[in-house]
């Protein structure tokens, strides 16, 4: 599903190098490492926001560096992304923000996709459907972001520090939703430095941990 | 095609994904209205100048005036002789001695009404209309010089040509103004699009994150601009037509802007202007937004 062969990325100075990773369908991965180690860059490469400076990155068996701008847009419809800062359109209400991926994909109705009401209910935001994003709490924003990420029923969900701004109780609630999605067969990749969250998740699902260290990624052992 | 589809089909989301910015909305709307107002006026000026040039060209091209200036004692006989020459000249369809009242009317703009021209050493004027073959101007002048030395033939060429030239220059300037105004509209749209895209970087990031193509994002912006420009220019064109309608008519001899109006098919410009604004702003905003989006990674 996501395969990296000797991938490197450089912002002038090399940040990541010799990444050899293979993430298969239905797996659950954590990506850890200190701040600034390249976790966000790793995820951005996976959804085509950044192109590797060298190496080969295949997503859904397609070399991402060979995709056109439109093809990258179509690729993103198959990948749900949850950001730490959520990134909503502040002038649209929660329901409209969640439905945004469906609308931009030129499906002018919600009938063929996930029922929006059910989705809002699933993430516990039915009562906040008409609220504007700035009116939401940190946890509500993260759940709304998750709902938006999965509305297109993507095969992969990439979450960048999804619990960074929320309390432990809300973090558990969010991770349970992600575990539920993994049980549905979705591939989950979460970038985090919260070890408690990783331990909590590993108690419920077989999650593997990728650690970024010395510019490269290694599969962490059972010490986590 | 996607851009055109998105702009023509009602899609609540395409309208909503870009927040309404009061400043750019007003700027696009009122600039379009002002420019459309100026375009309709320039069109009216051009058409008026064109009509004037044609009228001078057509109505004066086949006419001439014979002026007989002689001492009062000889004036009648000289006039008779001149009329006699004209009656024997081939190519002249008709000629007519202007009445005293008509000559008085000609002088009225300079001397005021009821001037006793009987007491003035006034020449007699004969209006000449040539037929389709025309007459031999040089031959007539020679005959007049021999038989009526006090007569001067004025075939209007001397003052008609500069007037026609001036009218055509006004016509050209009118169209040049229209071209410049359209150029300004295009420049304005490029700047407005650039400003709107810069101030909505976050919106673009979010839309890209959820899988929007550049065409979709461009359509969201372009749609707003194109409709604002259309409605603004429609308002401007309408106000211009009302203003033209309220201008003094040609019948009113005191009016300065004689003939400044639209006639017949020329009124279709009131539809052409808003439509061309729509097409122009659509194309300009689309090309510039796609080019800007391409440069935004």
Image (tube, rainbow, N blue to C red):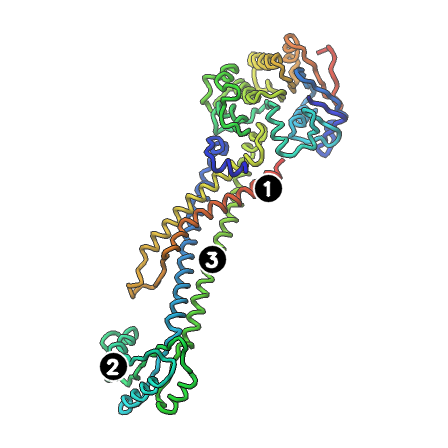
- Point out the image quarter for the C terminus of chain A: top right
Picture disc at residue B291: 1
Q: Please provide percent x and percent y for residue B64.
A: 37, 78
Residue A49 appears in the figure: yes
- Which residue, as the protein is rendered here, is positioned at the far top? A203
Dot 3 surroundings within 10 Å: few (below 14), some, or many (20 or more)? some
Task: Say whether mark 3 and mark 2 are on the same chain.
Answer: yes
* Residue at numbered disc 3: B177
Picture disc at residue A70: none
Residue at 70% over, 15% down: A209
> Secondary structure beneath disc 2?
helix
Horizontal arrangement in the rendering, residue A30 relative to residue B87 (left or right)? right
Residue at 47% over, 34% down: B15
Q: CA distance from mark 2 to mark 3?
A: 47 Å
Task: Say whether mark 1 and mark 3 are on the same chain.
Answer: yes
The numbered mark 1 sits on a residue in which chain?
B
> Secondary structure beneath disc 1?
helix
* Residue at numbered disc 2: B117
Q: Are marks 2 and 1 in contact (CB under 8 Å)?
A: no
Q: CA distance from mark 2 to mark 1?
A: 75 Å
Residue A134 appears in the figure: no
- Point out the image quarter for the N terminus of chain A: top right
């Amino acid at each position: 599903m996501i395969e990296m062969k000797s991938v490197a990325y450089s912002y002038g100075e090399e940040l990541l190098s010799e990444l050899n990773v293979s993430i298969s369908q239905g797996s659950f991965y954590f990506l850890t490492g200190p701040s600034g180690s390249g976790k966000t860059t790793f995820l951005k490469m996976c959804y085509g926001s950044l192109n590797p400076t060298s190496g080969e990155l295949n997503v859904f068996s397609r070399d991402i560096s060979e995709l056109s701008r439109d093809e990258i847009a179509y690729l993103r419809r198959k990948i749900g992304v949850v950001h730490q800062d959520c990134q909503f359109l502040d002038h649209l209400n929660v329901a409209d923000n969640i439905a945004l991926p469906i609308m931009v994909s030129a499906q002018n109705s919600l009938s063929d996709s996930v029922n929006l009401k059910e989705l809002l209910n699933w993430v516990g935001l039915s009562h906040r459907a008409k609220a504007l994003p700035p009116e939401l709490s940190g946890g509500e924003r993260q759940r709304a972001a998750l709902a938006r990420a999965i509305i297109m029923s993507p095969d992969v969900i990439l979450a960048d520090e999804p619990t960074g701004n929320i309390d432990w109780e809300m973090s558990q609630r969010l991770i349970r939703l992600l575990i539920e999605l993994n049980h549905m067969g979705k591939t989950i990749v979460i970038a985090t430095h919260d070890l408690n969250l990783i331990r909590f998740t590993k108690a419920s699902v077989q999650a593997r941990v990728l650690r970024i260290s010395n510019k490269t990624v290694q599969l962490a052992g059972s010490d986590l | 095609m996607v851009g055109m589809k998105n702009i023509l089909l009602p899609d609540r989301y395409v309208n909503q994904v870009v927040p309404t910015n009061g400043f750019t909305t007003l700027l696009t709307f009122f600039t379009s209205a002002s420019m459309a107002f100026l375009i309709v006026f320039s069109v009216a000026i051009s058409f008026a100048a064109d009509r004037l040039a044609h009228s001078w060209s057509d109505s004066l091209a086949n006419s001439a005036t014979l002026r007989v200036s002689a001492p009062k004692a000889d004036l009648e006989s000289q006039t008779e002789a001149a009329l006699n020459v004209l009656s024997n000249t081939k190519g002249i369809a008709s000629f007519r001695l202007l009445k005293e009242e008509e000559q008085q009317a000609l002088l009225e703009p300079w001397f005021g009404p009821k001037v006793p021209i009987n007491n003035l050493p006034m020449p007699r004027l004969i209006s000449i209309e040539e037929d389709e073959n025309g007459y031999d101007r040089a031959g007539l002048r020679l005959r007049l010089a021999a038989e009526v030395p006090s007569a001067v033939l004025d075939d209007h060429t001397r003052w008609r040509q500069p007037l026609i030239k001036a009218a055509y220059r006004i016509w050209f300037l009118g169209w040049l103004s229209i071209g410049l105004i359209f150029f300004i509209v295009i420049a304005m749209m490029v700047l407005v699009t650039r400003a709107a895209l810069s101030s909505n970087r976050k919106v673009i990031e979010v839309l890209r994150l959820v899988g929007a193509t550049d065409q979709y994002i461009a359509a969201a912006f372009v749609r707003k601009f194109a409709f604002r420009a259309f409605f603004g220019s429609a308002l401007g064109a309408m106000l211009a037509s009302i203003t033209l309608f309220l201008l003094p008519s040609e019948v009113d001899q005191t009016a300065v802007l004689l003939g400044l109006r639209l006639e017949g098919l020329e009124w279709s410009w009131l539809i052409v202007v808003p439509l061309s604004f729509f097409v122009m702003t659509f194309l300009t905003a689309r090309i510039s937004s796609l080019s800007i989006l391409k440069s935004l990674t």
